[in-house]
Amino acid sequence: MNNFPGDDRKSRAASTTSSGHFCDSSELRQVRAWQMTWESTLCTKMAEMDRSRRRVH
């Protein structure tokens, strides 16, 4: 985890992602948007794999 000099209060106030990366609110919004995009992409890919797997068997 990164320790920034003299920002103890700030880091506690900021939200932390699961990877332990400190985010301010605007960065956090970007991360959330990216996660949602990534998750929906992943779900689509999984569904495609599922369909092709069913076709094979």
Image (cartoon, grey):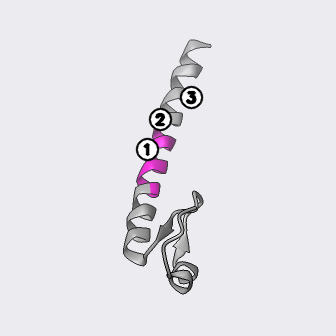
Q: Image height check: is 31 above or below 48? A: below
Q: Which of 16 and 53 is in front in this view?
A: 16
Kindly indicate the quadrant of the structure image that contains residue 12.
Answer: bottom right
Magenta part, dominant SS:
helix
Q: Under tag 1, what secondary structure?
A: helix
Label 2 environment density (alpha carbons within 10 Å; few <14, some 14–19, many ≥20): few
Query: Which is in the foreground here, disc 1 or disc 3?
Result: 1
Q: Under tag 3, what secondary structure?
A: helix
* Residue placed under numbered mark 2 in the picture: 45
Label 3 environment density (alpha carbons within 10 Å; few <14, some 14–19, many ≥20): few
Q: In this view, does 3 lie to the left or right of 24?
A: right
Q: Is residue 2 left or right of residue 27?
A: right
Sequence-wise, the earlier of marks 1 and 3 is: 1
Highlighted magenta segment, given as a residue range = 35-44
User: In which quadrant is the C terminus drawn?
Assistant: top right
Q: Distance between the residues labelled 1 and 2?
A: 6 Å
Q: Distance between the residues labelled 1 and 3?
A: 14 Å
Instruction: Tell me the number on the disc at residue 55.
Output: none
* Residue placed under numbered mark 3 in the picture: 50
Q: Which of 51 and 15 is in front in this view?
A: 15
Measured from the top left, where is residue 41 in percent x and y?
43, 44
Q: Image height check: is 38 above or below 50? A: below
* Residue placed under numbered mark 1 in the picture: 41
Residue type of the residue flagged with mark 1 = Thr
The extreme top residue here reads 56
Q: In this view, does 48 lie to the left or right of 20?
A: left
Q: Distance between the residues labelled 3 and 2?
A: 9 Å
Verify CB contact (< 8 Å) between mark 1 and mark 2.
yes
Residue depicted at x 53% and y 64%? 2
Q: Does 40 lie within the magenta span?
A: yes
Residue type of the residue flagged with mark 3 = Asp
Sequence-wise, the earlier of marks 3 and 2 is: 2
